[in-house]
Amino acid sequence: MTKVRMPAVSHLSFGRRKKLDSEMSSVIFNAPNPIYCIQSTQHLILAYCIHSSKFMAPKTDDDLYRQGSQYRLWSFTTTELSSIREKVNRRAIAKIKHEHATNGFEHVPVEFLTVQEELDLVLYYCGKLQDMSGLFKLPSHVKATGISYLKRFYLRHSVMEYHPKNILHACLFLAAKSENHFISIESFTQLLAKVTQESILELEFTVAQALSFTLMVHHAFSPIHGYFLDIQSIFPSRIDEIGAAHDAARRLANDSLFSDAAFLFTPPQIALGALAMANDSLVEQYLEIKFTNQPATLEQLSNVIKNVRTYIEQGAQQLPKERVVAIDKKLYFVTNPGKLNKRKVEDNNGTGSAVDSDAKRVKIDKTDDDSTPVP
């Protein structure tokens, strides 16, 4: 008896699949013999798909990308992105103020972090995650996924709730698993000082939950390689020039990880912008050939490249260490208001009484408060 390969029906709606399951079950249980059962089921599915032709319409790569989680959940306009961060910041401040009041610190003059300070601290620890990836000799796509997880996490939570130095370990560990580059938890913690297996595993689910369990991340590295192959087919005699542009574009795509580019542009757009920064004339000639007599499309692509370039340049900028230290110091007193109160008393020549910070330390739900200023 020949085995029939069943067509996939996962794209059908729940109601249609339920109806199809019912019809298939009826055929199977009422079939006079197994051969009839297999043939009838196959014919039923084929007939169903033919009559439901809208489910079989061809899809472009753009259509497929827009149906994916990266576009649906993690692509924004600049206005939307700013609004999300402001909302996360306000919610965290309200939560921590409540915790302070509960623990008797409502009169302590705590200075909360601004949205920009939170973002700067996250980007600083994205750099630390990159350094850690080098320590483990991880591939570029694993490092990029870990950085993406860290940035996405802080669109759901504030650094005043979860310190990035704790979250980044869980992000990289989870990224290695999701990118099929598994590292055992024993090996992972062996190279990290003062990091326990429990501290990572306890936060792994919290990170995955904040990511809405969307662990697949598309990066600009693959589109850069695709452009590399396509440009070669058009300019076969310029292989060395194209290869140099490819290598430079990968480095520029890495810089884009330290900006908001991935939230605002698609991976192919970032790749094209990186290639244009690497070799502007080559990309200009390539696009003119690909889009001959399409001036509107060329103008649109030119604007995209210009905008992407701005974010890549931002990502390449180094944050001053002094600013990071100042931000982390503010964060330390946000999560340890008793320390700030004690310092205020000492500044007043010992007048008054300091609050016993050990007895009344603020406890933020699910937060590791072991946050000390950046060394």
Image: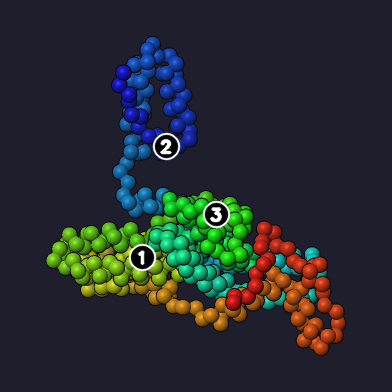
Is label 2 in contact with label 3 (beta carbons under 8 Å)? Answer: no
Residue 184 % position (x, y):
51, 52
Judge left or right: residue 64 versus residue 285: right
Position of the N terminus, as image quadrant, is top left
Query: How far from the left and from the top, in percent, is residue 101?
Result: 78, 67
Seen in the image, is 120 located left or right of residue 225? right
Q: Neighbour class for label 3 at 10 Å: few (<14), some, many (≥20)?
A: few
Residue drawn at x 39%, y 68% is 254
Give the CA distance from mark 1 to mark 3: 36 Å
Does residue 71 appear in the picture of this structure? no
Q: Amino acid at mark 3?
A: Glu
Q: Give the residue at x 69% y 72%.
A: 334
Q: Which residue is mark 2?
A: 10
The amino acid type of the residue labelled 2 equals Ser
- Tell me: residue 61, above or below residue 234: above
Q: In the rendered image, which quarter is residue 303 located in?
A: bottom left
Q: Nearer the viewer, residue 131 or 273?
A: 131
Of the numbered discs 2 and 1, the one sitting upstream in the chain is 2
Query: Which residue is drawn at the image coordinates 34% and 16% (left, top)?
Result: 35
Label 1 Cα crowd, 10 Å radius (few <14 / some 14-19 / many 20+)? many
Q: Residue furthest top?
A: 32
SS assignment at label 3: helix
Cα separation between marks 2 and 3:
38 Å
Residue placed under numbered mark 1 in the picture:
270
Q: Say which quarter of the image contains residue 336.
A: bottom right
Q: Which residue is mark 3?
A: 186
- Mark 1 belongs to which amino acid? Ile
User: Are the residues tagged 1 and 3 within 8 Å (C-beta)?
Assistant: no
- By what rule are the colours in the image chosen? rainbow
The residue lying toward the viewer, choosing from 214 and 18, is: 214
Mark 2 residue element: loop
Secondary structure beneath dot 1 equals helix
